[in-house]
Image: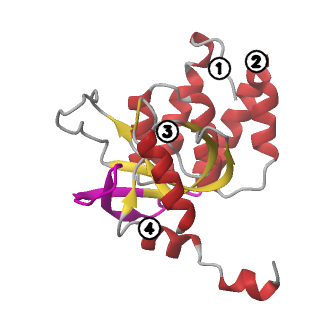
């Protein structure tokens, strides 16, 4: 790829905005996909094989909303969480039998506005891109970093991944999302984190998660 080619690539904002006009969905129960994180998926159902083919032929973007009810053949479509993580396929490995493994890189989040009718076997929605959480406090990042440093000292099980996070040169939304991805397991709590609009609110939720880490052994990065 040349520098000129790179200049012609759409920005993340433009990519997200364009995709939200007709956003393909890969809904999963108990799954909350956070921006700035990576999500590996194994694709085996025919409808999602079709989704991957269509998405790869376009801009590579799809959303992974949390499925809030059970699916049943011929029954009504189960509800979805209203705010979804949106990602772009950055790795794709197709198998001889048609299954595939993909990796999504989170590029942002969006709020579902309405479901679109169509002839695809998978669900498609119109959505509104949501901005990154507002940087509303100069103290948010230092508080998070200090808490992470303390966590690394007192909890050997998470010391290495936490130190890796602290060493990364990423902006505060990316750091918050990485910490949430590592520490928050409960789907309802992850969904609540995804929907927060201010960095200070995200940090407060992460501080609560870190305060209870000793009561939840086995946390993995």
Helix, strand or loop under label 4 = helix
Quarter of the view holding residue 210: top right
Quarter of the view holding residue 166: top right
Instruction: Determine crowd level at label 4: few under 14, some 14-19, many 20+ residues with C-alpha closer than 10 A.
Output: many
Which residue was labeled with disc 2? 157
Count of labels in the image? 4
Image position of 23 with respect to 154: above or below? below
Residue 116: horizontal and vertical position, in percent?
24, 60
Which of the labelled discs sits on residue 19, or is there none?
4
Residue under the point 60% across and 19% down: 213
Residue under the point 79% across and 26% down: 159
Mark-to-mark CA distance, 2 and 4: 39 Å
Which of the labelled discs sits on residue 105, or is there none?
none
Mark-to-mark CA distance, 2 and 3: 22 Å
Helix, strand or loop under label 2 = helix
Mark-to-mark CA distance, 1 and 2: 7 Å
Q: Nearer the viewer, mark 4 or mark 3?
A: 4
Image quarter hosting the N terminus = bottom right
Mark-to-mark CA distance, 3 and 1: 19 Å
Q: Earlier in the sequence, mark 2 or mark 4?
A: 4
Front one among 146 and 52: 52
Mark-to-mark CA distance, 1 and 4: 34 Å
- Protein image colouring: secondary structure
Front one among 114 and 174: 114
Which residue was labeled with disc 1? 219
Q: Nearer the viewer, mark 2 or mark 4?
A: 4
- Indicate left or right for 95 with 108 as reference: right
Which residue was labeled with disc 3? 204
The part of the chain drawn in magenta is: 110-138
């Amino acid at each position: 790829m040349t520098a000129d080619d790179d200049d012609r690539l759409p920005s993340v904002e433009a990519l997200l905005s364009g995709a939200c006009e007709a956003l393909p969905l890969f809904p999963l129960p108990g799954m909350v996909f956070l921006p700035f994180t990576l999500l590996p998926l194994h694709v085996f159902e025919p409808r999602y094989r079709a989704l991957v083919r269509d998405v790869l032929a376009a801009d590579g973007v799809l959303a992974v909303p949390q499925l809030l009810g059970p699916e049943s053949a011929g029954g009504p479509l189960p509800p979805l969480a209203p705010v979804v993580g949106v990602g772009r396929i950055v790795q794709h490995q197709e198998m001889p039998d048609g299954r595939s493994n993909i990796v999504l890189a989170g590029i942002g989040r969006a709020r579902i506005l309405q479901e679109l009718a169509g002839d695809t076997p998978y669900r498609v929605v119109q959505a509104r891109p949501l901005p990154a959480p507002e940087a509303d406090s100069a103290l948010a990042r230092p508080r998070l970093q200090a808490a992470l440093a303390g966590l690394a000292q007192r909890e050997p099980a998470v010391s290495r991944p936490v130190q890796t996070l602290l060493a990364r040169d990423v902006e505060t939304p990316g750091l918050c999302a990485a910490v949430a991805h590592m520490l928050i397991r409960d789907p309802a709590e992850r969904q609540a984190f995804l929907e927060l609009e201010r960095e200070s609110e995200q940090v407060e939720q992460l501080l609560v998660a870190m305060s209870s880490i000793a009561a939840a052994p086995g946390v993995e990065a």
